[in-house]
Image (tube, helix red, strand yellow):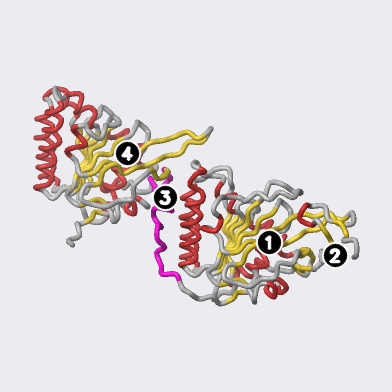
Amino acid sequence: MEQLKRLQSGIEGLDALLKGGLVAGASYIVQGRPGSGKTILANQIGFNHARNGGRVLVGTLLSESHERLFQFLSTLSFFDQNKIGAEVQFVSAFDTLENEGLDEVVKLLRREIIRQKATVLIVDGLLNARSKAETPLDTKKFISELQGHAAFAGCTVLFLTSSRLDDGSPEHTMVDGVIEMGEELFGSRSVRRIQLRKTRGSSALSGLHECEITDDGLVVYPRLESLYSRPSYIDTSDLTRLASGIDHLDHLIDGGLPRSSVTLMMGPSGIGKTCLGLNFLAQATPENPGLHFGFYETPQRLRLKAAAMGIDLKRMEETGALHMAWQPTTEGLLDALGARLLRLVEEKNVKRLFIDSLGGMARVATNPARVTEFFSALMNELRARGVTVMASWEMRDLFGSQIHAPAPELSSIVDNMLLLRFVELNSQLKRLMSIIKMRDSFYDSTLLEVVINDHGIDLKKTFTHAESVLSGSATQAPNA
């Protein structure tokens, strides 16, 4: 099957949506309300094309001066003043449109395409052209003639419009692709979205995807479950055991955690989930590095907490055995977090990963209904990359007999589950651990007391003669 030639956009994530980039020589409409990022997207594509040896013509049908546009674009790293007038040429067609009409605009842009030898044409202000058209047929003629001239010159075209055109509009029927940009409010938080509504002759990642405007320009974050609907690597059948960091636990679970598995620790705040995770990471080496991907405690606080258990995280960081990434839960995008995590795993060749916690990641989700699919795709990708994962999830209730699963269909996300609870026994508050699930493994289901001290973590069979332990208020058995 013949592969279409692609023009890379230079926008992180957008080429992934487009399955390789814009189709060279095709025409696209970029639509969205004012402020949605259309102009940044188009100019970012243009300047990237110029850096790669192409030539760009930007024809504006707007009254705004180019100097004002350059002032705004100059705050973004992709903007290069030296390219303007050379590889990137800006031409105002506003006066021509107002005084002479659409036909003369077409002639003006045609002359400039030839003079500039443009391989990308950006037409900003399609709404103004539409308002000057007497009939929908005139709009189709305007687009068709520009497409014809551009195609003859081997030029890819982007039409920018601030109106939200319907799928059956004359403009949509004429172009090869439609990229829609928008912004939604979730409470007091604003989230930018991008959607490929039409991609003729090319597959694409459909649906809504999150994006943001940074100092480097537009960054697109494809929905992780669509980007990794299938893992990018072939999963291995290696069930080699890895040390959990707690010898007694390894003895109970057939020698350790299966390699490339996902273990979830569920329990209330203060129960010791982070301490267990730090002991797991303490087994990392420079050859098989670990990563702490956290949301609640800063790296400095973690170093102090680990030192109290005899773990020198700073030394591990210096040798390359451990890396730490912290992000607050106040702002953020779910797919951006997933992309950052996978990028760090690849860059650092991470083999042990502790996510503290999955609840911290889920907190920034704008659509809670997709959290299960997101985590399922993320964990499948991590398994395929040979990463052994330990993750925490905070449970709401400190005491009580009821246990609420943090998410539906946990089997699609995790392989192993450890439950941690607070238990009162003989007027003392104790930490309890029980192994709920170990996929493809034998395990001891004994209820264990977790003891955290300056030597690390110990597990004791404190509850062998107690009853009603999981209720939170244990009692001594009558014959104990």
211 part of magenta stretch: no
Q: Is residue 216 above or below residue 255?
A: above
Residue receiving disc 2: 465
Q: CA distance from mark 4 to mark 2?
A: 65 Å
Closer to us: mark 3 or mark 1?
3
Of all residues shown, which one is farthest toward the front? 479
Q: Position of residue 107 (x, y in %)?
A: 9, 35
Q: Position of residue 45 (x, y in %)?
A: 29, 48
* Kind of residue indicated by mark 2: His
Rounded to the nearest whole Å, what is the CA distance between mark 2 and mark 1? 38 Å
Q: Name the element at disc 4.
A: strand
Q: Position of residue 44 (x, y in %)?
A: 31, 46
Q: State the extent of the magenta-drawn residues as a range.
A: 213-235
Which residue is located at x 46 percent, y 57 percent?
377
Q: Quadrant of residue 392?
A: bottom right
For disc 3, the marked residue is 223
Amino acid tagged 4 = Glu
Residue 437 or residue 329, whichever sits in front: 437
In magenta segment, residue 216: yes
On residue 303, which mark appears?
1
Measure how far apart labels 2 and 3 are at the Cα level: 50 Å
Q: Is residue 320 at all visible to an observer of this figure?
A: no
- Along the horizontal axis of the image, is 71 left or right of 157? right
